[in-house]
Image: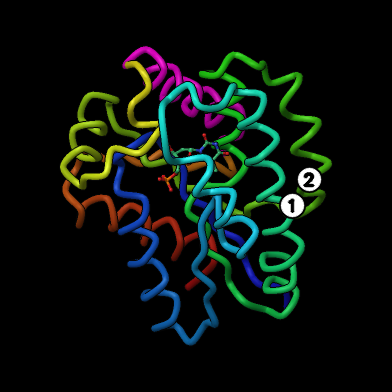
Amino acid sequence: MRGKFISFEGGEGGGKSTQAVRLAGFLRSKGLDVVETREPGGTQQGEELRDLLVQGDPDRWSPFSELLMMTAARVEHVNRLIEPSLAAGKWVICDRFLDSTLAYQGIAGGLGLDMVRPLQAKAVGDTLPDVTFLLDVREEAGLQRAEKRGGAARFEKKQAEFHSKVRDGFLALAAESPNRIVVVDAEDTFDAVWQQIEGEMKQRFKL
Ligand code: TMP
């Protein structure tokens, strides 16, 4: 049987990565075969593009160049890892997927969803997440957390206004797809956030 595809989304410092690790452990405890991956990244090609994308000055790349590189990384990821894993019955947990491109490049970057969506449809085909957890956090709180983690990556250095558009963008996407995108209040404690995710997973997939 085909596996399930779960993505985590949100602005900076929402705790996606730690919740994704916890979810992987939970699914494995249920006997499922789990692949943990991330975007941009997940393949050698994608990780090479990631290095170009997340390092350097905020204006190193234009939103259009970001769109093309993020999408190139995604095409390799879908074709080489995500789709074959799902077809083999594995459950794939992905830290960011195409909603990030819609929010960061399409909405905050100003390219517009009408431009970004058709390219994403071409890139991923039918490989869409079964469920997406949007870890929502006020941008100031998220950026503070991200800063503590260190290494201020390229996108984190963009202006506050950019991050506020990212957040609003994600919430607008969630409002458009309420069945797929589950909004989780990520300013709550780690355990409280996990409980929301676990509850949703149990209910949705009868785990
Ligand atoms: P991460 O540090 O959360 O893994 O993500 C790397 C950065 O890349 C993050 O600041 C968001 C950004 N990003 C985009 O702008 N568009 C995309 O499509 C993806 C996947 C990530």
The amino acid on which the numbered mark 1 sits, given as a three-letter code, is Val
180 to the left or right of 81: left
Rendering colour mode: rainbow
133 to the left or right of 45: left
Q: Which residue is mark 1?
A: 75
- Circle 1 crowding by C-alpha within 10 Å: few under 14, some 14–19, many from 20: some
In terms of image quadrants, where is residue 202? bottom left
Give the residue drawn at x 61%, y 55%. 46
> Residue 184's x, y, as percent?
36, 41
Magenta part of the chain: 160-178
Q: Which residue is mark 2?
A: 123
Nearer to me, 158 or 169: 158
Give the residue drawn at x 46%, y 49%. 8
Q: Is residue 143 above or below residue 81?
A: above
- Circle 2 crowding by C-alpha within 10 Å: few under 14, some 14–19, many from 20: some
Query: Residue 146 has which mark?
Result: none
Q: How many marks?
A: 2
Q: Are marks 2 and 1 in contact (CB under 8 Å)?
A: yes
Q: Quadrant of the N terminus?
A: bottom right
Q: Does the stretch in magenta take in 139?
A: no
122 to the left or right of 39: right
Q: Is residue 131 above or below residue 182?
A: below
The amino acid on which the numbered mark 2 sits, given as a three-letter code, is Ala
Q: Is residue 50 above or below residue 24?
A: above
> Residue 36's x, y, as percent?
49, 68
In terms of image quadrants, where is residue 88? bottom right
Q: CA distance from mark 2 to mark 1?
A: 5 Å
Give the residue drawn at x 78%, y 45%. 123
Prevailing secondary structure of the magenta residues: helix
Determine the secondary structure under disc 2.
Answer: helix
Give the residue drawn at x 65%, y 72%. 3
